[in-house]
Amino acid sequence: MEYLWDGLREAAGMLWRLDPEVCSIAWVSLKVTFLSTALAAAAGVPLGAWLAVSQFRGKRVAVGILNALMALPTVVVGLFLYSLLTRRGLLGPLGLLYTVTAMVAGQFLLAVPLVAAMTVGVVQGADPRVIPTARTLGASPWRARLTLMGEVRWGLVAAVLAGFGRVFGEVGVSMMVGGNIRGYTRTLTTAIALQTGRGEFALGLALGIVLLGVALLVNGAVQLVPRGAAGREP
Amino acid sequence: MGTAARNGVWGLLLAAAGCGAGPGPDAVLRMSTTTSLDHSGLLEVLLPAFERRHGVRVHVVAVGTGKALKLGENGDVDVVLVHDPESEDRFLAEGHGVARREVMVNDFVLAGPAADPAGVKGLKDAAEAMRRIAAARAVFVSRGDDSGTHKKERALWKAAGVVPRGGWYLEAGQGMGPVLRMAAERRGYCLADRGTLLAARDREDLEVLLEGDPRLLNPYSVIPVHPARHPRARYREARMLAEWLVSAEGQELIGRYTRDGRALFIPSALRSAPR
């Protein structure tokens, strides 16, 4: 209980004086997570939508694999990427280990299965009459699919937000391929792991509270802004 | 009836009577120690011998020195085995632990790439080596985690009169293994305890460039958690472990432990008294 209290007080202090170190760590976290989430959305949403509407042999197997990949431990993705990026690895000559780029790539791998699998569910759960109706109204096949995506846009936003949540709070990939280098690849989660390792539990909790606050802000912004701007119904 | 069986019966009776602190075969002692010691492999030799002798199982939590002491402070473990005399002094002064015994020493070495861009190979003075690394702005990977090793590194920078800062100085904030890996990848220098360096698998690219400076000695001590502060801590078993580590049997096992044909630790209890 004492740690929780100290942590809350410490977190309030950090936010109040906009602690420069915490700000820079939070900025690295946000930067990496936004990039990886955006890329994961760009790849995962079309992949999931395609899987949901197309018919082919082995589709259920493909969706099953996607669902299983959601359970992939972050540290395994980190290890996999590390084995590629190390000097002795296949991509070693690129010199990407312990860079922001490597972290983005790892988080992208983490988020894509989640975004795609949730997109499959969202699109399959849509009203099955949307596409035939659009077609009878004269829409081209692509236009009809776009209409379908418009119908389920809030589900897609939720899928992308889930991807954001998965990578914003992960520590395995960031630690393995980012390296927790101060002022460069140190994120909120690796900083929490560091403070915990130092025995600075209150400071770790405070950073956790900051992380939660930032995640709340991002979710709140996504929930509120476009809804007001675009309107719910066409 | 064998002694083991009799101990078992006693253990059950004691447990039933609500005093589970009795040293039965089921007794479990929790010890926090540093990752560097855990990675050296020594504990896998020592602890089974202790368990056979005293019938007390030891569960090891391997973390940084800072956290290892914090776990002791909170009563989450019964005994700590760490290597940072200054933090230990504070731990004892604040009454968290009692009856520290020095168990053994090993040493730190300055490791780096064979190419040695800062030209420190063969130096005897660790502070001079740090000065040269800073002057050459050669990559140096720091633990950056307040561990015993990190504190030693900071002491060396201080002795060198250098405030390490800049793109060449990477504060990893991670354990010894990851830091060695990072130094090898970045072709940089780092301060490492010899045990972990010898035990590391990815160390082909790292060489021992400087060793033998007396400032690089690294003493390990065992400290039972204070029974007055944490009455539920297994103080009796903790003392048992401490006494055994400094006994002739424990010391001999420590001295005999080798890795790649080299001894990692020098038993030192026989020349230190309880404090």
Image (tube, coloured by chain):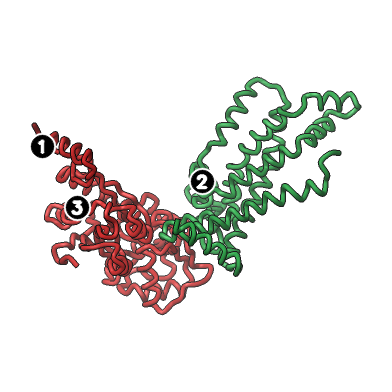
- Same chain check for tags 3 and 2: no
Question: Which residue is at a point 63% across and 40% down the rendered structure image?
Answer: A112
Please say if the residues under marks 3 and 1 sit with CB atoms less than 8 Å apart.
no
Q: Is residue B197 visible?
A: no
Q: Where is residue A12 shown, x and y percent of the image?
A: 57, 63
For the residues carrying marks 3 and 2, which lies nearer the camera in this image? 3
Q: Chain of mark 1?
A: B
- Mark 2 nearby-residue class (10 Å; few <14, some 14–19, many ≥20): many
Q: What residue would you read off at disc 1?
A: B3
Amino acid under label 2? Gly
Quadrant occupied by the N terminus of chain B = top left
**Gap between marks 1 and 2 measured at Cα:** 50 Å
Horizontal side, residue A161 vs residue A19: left or right: right
Chain A: its colour in the image is: green
Asked which quadrant contains residue B242, the reply is: bottom left
Residue farthest to the right?
A138
Contact (Cβ within 8 Å) of mark 3 with mark 2? no
Q: Residue A193: x percent and y percent?
A: 47, 55
**Colour given to chain B in the rendered image:** red
Q: Nearer the viewer, residue A208 or A43?
A: A208
Q: Report the disc number at residue B236.
A: 3
Q: Marks 3 and 1, how far apart in space? A: 20 Å
* Residue A162 visible in the picture: yes
Q: Earlier along the polypeptide chain: callout 3 or callout 1?
A: 1
Q: The residue under label 3 is which amino acid type?
A: Arg
Q: Seen from this angle, which residue lies furthest left?
A: B1
Residue extending farthest to the top is A57
Would you name the residue on which mark 2 appears? A78
User: Is A121 rendered above or below residue A217?
Assistant: above
